[in-house]
Image (tube, rainbow, N blue to C red):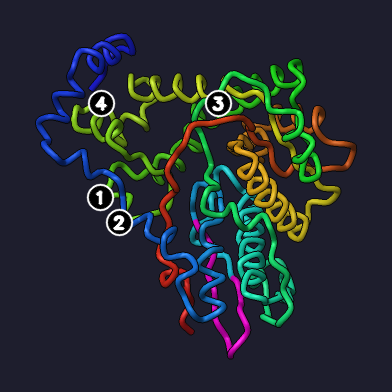
């Protein structure tokens, strides 16, 4: 279905979507993917210490919500953590850097959750080299609770537009211990332009965009069948689906009104950004990437505790040929010589949002 952007807006405003909603009766009132969100309410309900800690760790942010972690329980106190390489993102993350950062987020939440129960984790990263398990972990007594852990259930990646007000100076000072904060208007304007241009490249480069399209989950049924990838759900989006205005085919067609409308909505949200956060590292080995993930989740938890929202906008950090110029530009702006920019994100006061779907913990456990 091809509609002009103006025609699509007029149909929405004129009642086509409302009519579709009404004709579906109570259908749209039950569009929340309850089963796919259940891991959030089940976190902490396990009695076995490793399973309890893992139930929190699976709530960690990760690229394209691929949730690539797999845990193998050994003996009474050991864990082997693997990264499921069948969940790789070869187009947007050809060197698995961002996926490794996601594993760092997972490991840090695992550590924090174990500490809540009085366990310290003795962790050996990449015990068999970069191509083997991510970590060998032993649970030992002695963990000290981390105050940031209190924000675990409230931390969500917020892709909405943020309020038109600066981030409070005391909040910036508090977060400066975790990352570099960019709030100067000139810097913010430059980064808004750079991050939007990088996003547009990702969305209009066919081989890259199709990787995302193939991971889109349209509506509650798809989300609950595959609670990973890019979730497109909720009453409004499912209304568009019912009205024939949102489909996987349209998202794969850059000339469709649906695709263009989506691009406009993303740009509007990204423009509503009062500040940015930056994480860099002196090295870019796998351990450096894991540590960047640990730092990112701690930063996000701290921001959440201050009433702030965050979203990674790391498209300019991706390492495929079409992004090379923006990769160079972002490093010239944000990194010292020899450093790697590991994460770049939006920061501001955002609206309340729901959690992201997760696979049940039991599906992330390896059975040898």
Element class at badge 3: loop
Element class at badge 4: loop
Cα–Cα span, label 4 and label 2? 22 Å
Q: Nearer the viewer, mark 3 or mark 1?
A: 3
In the image, residue 302 sits, relative to residue 239, either above or below, namely below
The reply to whether the magenta stretch includes residue 74 is: yes
- Tag count in the figure? 4
| Residue assigned mark 3 | 162
| Residue assigned mark 2 | 225
Q: Is residue 250 left or right of residue 193?
A: left
| Residue assigned mark 1 | 221
Which residue is pictured at 53% across the width and 48% down the height?
154
Q: Nearer the viewer, residue 158 or 325?
A: 158
Q: Nearer the viewer, mark 4 or mark 1?
A: 1
Within 10 Å of disc 3 (Cα), the crowding (few <14, some 14-19, many 20+) is many
Kindly give the residue lying farthest to the bottom in the view shown. Answer: 75
In the image, residue 3 sits, relative to residue 221, either above or below, namely above
| Residue assigned mark 4 | 245
Q: Residue 244 in the image: x percent, y percent?
A: 21, 28
> Looking at the image, is mark 4 or mark 1 earlier in the sequence?
1
Element class at badge 2: helix
In the image, residue 365 sits, relative to residue 234, either above or below, namely below
For the residues labelled 4 and 2, say whether their Cβ atoms are less than 8 Å apart.
no
For the residues labelled 1 and 2, say whether their Cβ atoms are less than 8 Å apart.
yes
Q: Residue 157 in the image: x percent, y percent?
A: 53, 42
Q: Nearer the viewer, mark 3 or mark 2?
A: 3
> Looking at the image, is mark 4 or mark 2 earlier in the sequence?
2
Within 10 Å of disc 1 (Cα), the crowding (few <14, some 14-19, many 20+) is some
The reply to whether the magenta stretch includes residue 205 is: no
Q: Is residue 213 left or right of residue 103?
A: left
Q: Residue 269 in the image: x percent, y percent?
A: 51, 24
Q: Which residues are magenta?
A: 67-81
């Amino acid at each position: 279905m091809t509609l002009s952007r103006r025609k699509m807006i007029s149909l929405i405003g004129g009642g086509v979507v409302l009519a579709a909603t009404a004709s579906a009766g109570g259908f749209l009132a039950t569009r929340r993917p309850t089963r796919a969100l259940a891991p959030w309410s089940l976190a902490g309900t396990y009695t076995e210490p490793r399973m309890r800690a893992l139930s929190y760790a699976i709530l960690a942010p990760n690229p394209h919500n691929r949730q690539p972690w797999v845990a193998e329980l050994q003996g009474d106190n050991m864990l082997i953590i693997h990264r499921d390489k069948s969940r790789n993102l070869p187009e947007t993350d050809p060197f698995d850097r961002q996926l490794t950062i996601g594993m760092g987020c997972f490991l840090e939440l695992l550590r924090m959750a174990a500490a809540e129960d009085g366990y310290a984790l003795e962790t050996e990263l990449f015990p068999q080299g970069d191509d083997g398990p991510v970590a060998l972990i032993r649970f030992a007594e002695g963990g000290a609770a981390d105050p940031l852990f209190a924000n675990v259930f409230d931390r969500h990646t917020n892709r909405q537009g943020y309020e038109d007000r600066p981030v409070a100076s005391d909040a910036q000072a508090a977060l400066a211990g975790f990352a570099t904060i960019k709030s100067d208007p000139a810097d913010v304007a430059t980064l808004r332009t750079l991050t939007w241009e990088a996003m547009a490249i990702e969305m209009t480069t066919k081989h890259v965009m199709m990787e995302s399209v193939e991971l889109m989950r349209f509506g509650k049924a798809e989300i609950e069948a595959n609670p990973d990838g890019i979730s497109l759900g909720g009453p409004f989006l499912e209304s568009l689906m019912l009205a024939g205005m949102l489909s996987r085919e349209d998202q794969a067609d850059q000339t469709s009104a649906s695709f263009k409308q989506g691009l406009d909505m993303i740009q509007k949200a990204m423009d509503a950004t009062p500040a940015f956060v930056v994480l860099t590292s002196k090295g870019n080995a796998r351990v450096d990437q894991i540590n960047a993930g640990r730092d990112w989740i701690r930063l996000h938890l701290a921001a959440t505790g201050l009433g702030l929202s965050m979203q990674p906008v790391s498209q300019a950090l991706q390492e495929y040929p079409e992004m090379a110029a923006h990769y160079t530009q972002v490093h010239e702006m944000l990194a010292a010589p020899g450093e790697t920019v590991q994460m770049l994100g939006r920061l501001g006061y955002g609206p309340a949002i729901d959690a992201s779907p997760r696979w049940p913990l039991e599906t992330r456990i390896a059975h040898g």
